[in-house]
Amino acid sequence: MADDKPAPAKKEEKKPEKKPSGDGKSEKKPKKPYQMWKLYEVKGDKLVRKNKFSPKAGEGYFMANHKDRLTCGKTYYMEKKDSPETPSTDKAADKAPSDKAPEEAKK
């Protein structure tokens, strides 16, 4: 009992760090299949193309239809869509007080 020294604290074992599998590159997600059936419409006996073909890439390469533009994924050709004009483009005229309001305030 002469040795009343406390037991030495146990050292925590370090777990080896997990390395990502492969060359350090993240795993690629599988690609979605190209949904060609969405680009055509059947009217009667004929197939009708919904999207425009790219003028640079040629027949068979559709232009992607975005909100404000058409783009070709192969050649990066882009066409802007005509945006509809807003009814009142002059905001200063909308904020200006009418001529009748100051006359009514004077009376």
Image: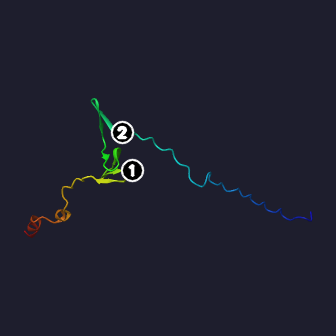
Q: CA distance from mark 2 to mark 1?
A: 19 Å
| 77 up-or-down from 39: above or below | below
User: What residue occupies the far top of the structure in this picture?
Assistant: 45
| 41 up-or-down from 10: above or below | above
Identified by mark 1, the residue type is Lys
Mark in the foreground, 2 or 1: 1
**Secondary structure beneath label 2:** helix
**Secondary structure beneath label 1:** loop
- Residue 89 placement, left or right of 19: left
- Residue 29 placement, left or right of 104: right
Query: Could you say which is closer to the camera, residue 52 or residue 59?
Result: 59
Mark earlier in primary sequence (2, 1)? 2
Q: Residues within 10 Å of mark 2 (few under 14, many from 20)?
A: few
Q: Position of residue 15 (x, y in %)?
A: 71, 56
The residue tagged 2 is 38
Q: Position of residue 53 (x, y in %)?
A: 31, 45
The residue tagged 1 is 74
Identify which residue is drawn at 56% across, 49% down: 27
Q: Which mark is residue 85?
A: none
Query: Could you say which is closer to the camera, residue 34 or residue 10?
Result: 34
Identify which residue is drawn at 18% across, 58% down: 88
Identify which residue is drawn at 36% across, 39% down: 38
| 24 up-or-down from 29: above or below | below
Number of marks in picture: 2
